[in-house]
Amino acid sequence: MAVFLVLLFAFCGFAQEIATKVSFSSTASTQLLPDTYLLSLTISATASKESTALSLLGKAHKELAKLSLPFSGGKFYLDRNCLLDKGTQKCQGFKASASYEFHLQDIQRQAAIFETLSSIDGINFAVHQTEWMISPARQEKAKEELMLSLLDKAKTFSDQIGKRLNKSCAIESISYQPSHTPILYAKTQTLPEPTKEPQTISITANISLICR
């Protein structure tokens, strides 16, 4: 804990009041076990016609929706299917693609996603990232509890400083800086299941007291 004492002078008519300003920072942390498995992947299809490429993606989207797994994304992108051949760009047909993020409670459910996409002729897919994460609701609850804990510490410290200075101290300002350290796993569907590890959520409070 860093503490800085600053003397403040306030003039009221001919009376002089000396106030002491105390600034310090304090950090509180907690560890939570992740509860959500994030799977990020892209599906793509190439065809001679735009409508065919988009139709393949539409079919894949419908099949993924049938799994009743929570996901976001699915916006389609379409472009010419071009490759560089000896410095020359050659285009043949069209390529459509879409990105998805699945938020799974059970990592084993990803197998159904891979099986579904593999069963659709003309569809390719690539896994970009997987990550064990703490759900946003649990993150927010943990942050709120840490902020209240730091506020209680600030009040206790304010009383202690007041006794040492023989003054009455009050919190003048307080600001919070949250941080979250996730455990990241880069993998493809052929790699073994990553192990859940606790993740740290921290809150740092910058606090100023005024003592008179």
Image (cartoon, grey):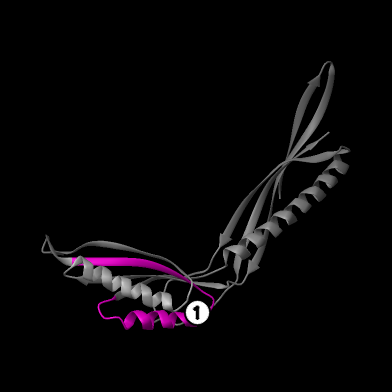
Q: Quadrant of residue 21?
A: top right
Most distant residue in the top direction: 14
Q: Is residue 188 visible?
A: no
Q: Is residue 12 above or below residue 6?
A: above
Secondary structure of residue under mark 1 = helix
Question: What residue lies at 47% left-to-right and 75% top-to-bottom?
Answer: 69
Q: Is residue 120 above or below residue 137?
A: below
Question: What residue lies at 79% left-to-right and 21% top-to-bottom?
Answer: 11
Residue topped by disc 1: 107
Q: Which residues are magenta?
A: 94-123
Question: What residue lies at 85% left-to-right and 46% top-to-bottom?
Answer: 159
Closer-to-camera residue (201/117): 117
Q: Is residue 60 above or below residue 140?
A: below
Q: Quadrant of residue 179?
A: bottom right
Amino acid bearing label 1: Ile
Q: Is residue 141 magenta?
A: no
In this image, 166 relative to 77: left or right? right
Question: x and y percent of residue 189 in the render?
Answer: 39, 79
Question: x and y percent of residue 62 in the render?
Answer: 37, 74
In this image, 97 relative to 212: left or right? left
Q: Quadrant of residue 90?
A: bottom left
